[in-house]
């Protein structure tokens, strides 16, 4: 049972320079520009896998870059000019690239001398090159983000990383498959999303028929089941209960189904024929959900595919995403209880090794009490996200705040007390309800005030901050 490693985006880098001024510049001019481009690639490479064609110095170079970029599956593209240059260079290079864009204006000078010369102004003209291409993108009606950050400015480079990562997460969603095992709970209108709505996000859903799912569980490889059961007990403390092997069998079956369909994540509904009410399966999927989320393939419950997508976005952004609900505002403290059932993302545990296995006596199935997990949430800044389709497009509701404590161990599931930045619990929850959020949410560590607006813009959806 291997935990997920940090998700790294695949990012294209387009750099340009203009030879028009070469005769008026010093002999080292071209090399200075190439060094600038190389430094930009090195900085991006600290957090992304970078595909960088050679520095574009002509439209012929741009055509070569266009072929290289079009042959890659890129999550995002960064345009980082080394100087002023015709915007046609980048326009041609990116003509066939379907990935969100960040314009990175990277000036290489901190203070202008009093006797600044025209030739040095040309050397330090990344801003002019960025403005030129920004105009072209607006003319084309194409969305993009902009960050101005010098190569030696750690604060603004942090903003660059957060912005590039956010749009890359949006780009990574394109063409993704999400698995469904079980219909939504009848009447749960707020968790539904039909094929047309999912297609507007660029994703599709694969549904496993009941008979196929039961057959998968029945045929789960016994050796794999035994290994997983052993690994779970070695990794996490507590008593998994008398049906641990059955829960491990569900986990193996779910993993194989996700593998087969190349799914980024998915949704299960334990409260119906596919799980608790099945004479073949007969248990909830809490353990399987925790394992797959830990591997970077988040799973939502009650068949809530919109929240599965939100969890996937949040986990790629931050490395942790808790499926949860805002249960109740506590009037005495202004806090709100956020909690999951017996499932959750172990990356949220505090301390990291304090995940406890439990027998899920709250949601038993026909074959007994499946294995679930419990832990307190690590404290610190956090963001709640909720993704939902509407009649006029998708909306991403979000709110920043902090997890300040976990004190409800008797719930026997992941939980913590959240303080909204925007106000006390009762007032914040009224605004949250007004936002149209689903009743399931994705809780991510950190205040994602840079990431969420960029993510929503790159997805082409509305965002509503609470």
Image (cartoon, rainbow, N blue to C red):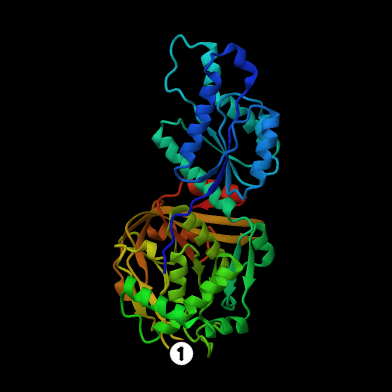
Label 1 crowd (10 A; few <14 / some 14-19 / many >=20)? some
Residue at image position (66%, 26%) is 86
Q: Establish if 98 lies above or below 133.
A: below
User: Relative to residue 46, is residue 197 depicted above or below?
Assistant: below
Image coordinates of residue 431 in percent, x first then y, are 48, 57
Residue at image coords 61%, 16%: 21
Residue depicted at 66% across the width and 62% down the height: 197
Of the pair 126 and 277, the residue shown nearer to us: 126
What is the count of numbered marks? 1
Give the answer, above or below, for where 89 lies relative to 173.
Answer: above
Asked if residue 456 lies left or right of residue 108, the reply is: right
Q: Position of residue 271 (x, y in %)?
A: 51, 81
Compared with 345, 151 (above or below) is: above
Residue, disc 1: 367
- Nearer-the-camera pick, 466 or 123: 123
* The quarter of the displayed image where residue 137 is located: top right
Tell me the residue at 47%/81% (across/down): 249
């Amino acid at each position: 049972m291997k935990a997920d490693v940090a998700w790294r985006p695949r990012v294209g880098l387009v750099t340009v320079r203009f030879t028009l001024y070469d005769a008026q510049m010093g002999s080292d001019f071209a090399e200075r520009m190439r060094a600038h481009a190389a430094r930009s690639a090195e900085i991006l490479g600290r957090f992304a896998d970078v595909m960088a064609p050679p520095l574009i110095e002509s439209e012929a170079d741009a055509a070569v870059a266009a072929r290289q970029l079009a042959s890659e599956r890129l999550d995002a593209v960064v345009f980082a000019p080394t100087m002023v240059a015709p915007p046609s260079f980048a326009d041609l290079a990116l003509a066939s690239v379907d990935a969100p864009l960040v314009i990175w204006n990277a000036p290489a000078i901190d203070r202008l001398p009093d006797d600044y010369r025209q030739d040095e102004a040309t050397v330090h003209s990344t801003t002019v090159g960025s403005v030129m291409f920004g105009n072209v993108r607006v003319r084309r009606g194409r969305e993009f983000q902009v960050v101005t950050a010098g190569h030696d400015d750690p604060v603004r480079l942090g903003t660059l990383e957060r912005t590039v990562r956010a749009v890359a997460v949006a780009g990574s969603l394109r063409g993704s498959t999400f698995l469904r095992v079980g219909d939504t709970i009848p009447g749960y209108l707020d968790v539904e999303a039909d094929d047309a709505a999912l297609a507007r996000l660029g994703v599709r859903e694969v549904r496993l028929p009941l008979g196929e799912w039961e057959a998968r569980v029945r045929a789960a490889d016994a050796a794999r089941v035994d290994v997983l059961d052993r690994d779970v007990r070695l990794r996490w403390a507590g008593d998994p209960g008398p049906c641990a092997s059955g829960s491990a069998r569900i986990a193996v079956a779910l993993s194989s189904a996700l593998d087969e369909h190349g799914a980024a994540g998915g949704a299960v509904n334990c409260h119906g024929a596919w799980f608790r009410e099945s004479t073949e399966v007969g248990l909830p999927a809490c353990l399987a959900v925790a394992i797959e989320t830990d591997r970077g393939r988040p799973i939502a419950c009650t068949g809530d595919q919109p929240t599965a997508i939100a969890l996937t976005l949040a986990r790629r952004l931050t490395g942790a995403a808790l499926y949860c609900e805002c249960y109740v505002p506590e009037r005495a403290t202004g806090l709100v209880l956020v909690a999951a059932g017996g499932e959750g993302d172990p990356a949220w545990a505090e301390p990291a090794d304090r995940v406890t296995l439990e027998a899920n006596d709250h949601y038993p199935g026909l074959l007994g009490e499946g294995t679930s997990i419990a832990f307190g949430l690590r404290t610190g800044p956090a963001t709640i996200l909720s993704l939902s389709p509407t009649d006029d497009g998708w909306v991403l509701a979000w709110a920043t705040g902090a997890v300040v404590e976990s004190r409800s161990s008797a719930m026997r599931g992941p939980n913590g007390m959240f303080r909204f930045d925007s106000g006390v619990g009762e007032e914040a929850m009224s605004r949250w309800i007004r936002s149209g959020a689903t009743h399931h949410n994705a809780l991510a560590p950190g205040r994602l005030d840079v990431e969420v607006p960029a993510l929503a813009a790159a997805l082409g959806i509305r965002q509503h901050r609470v």
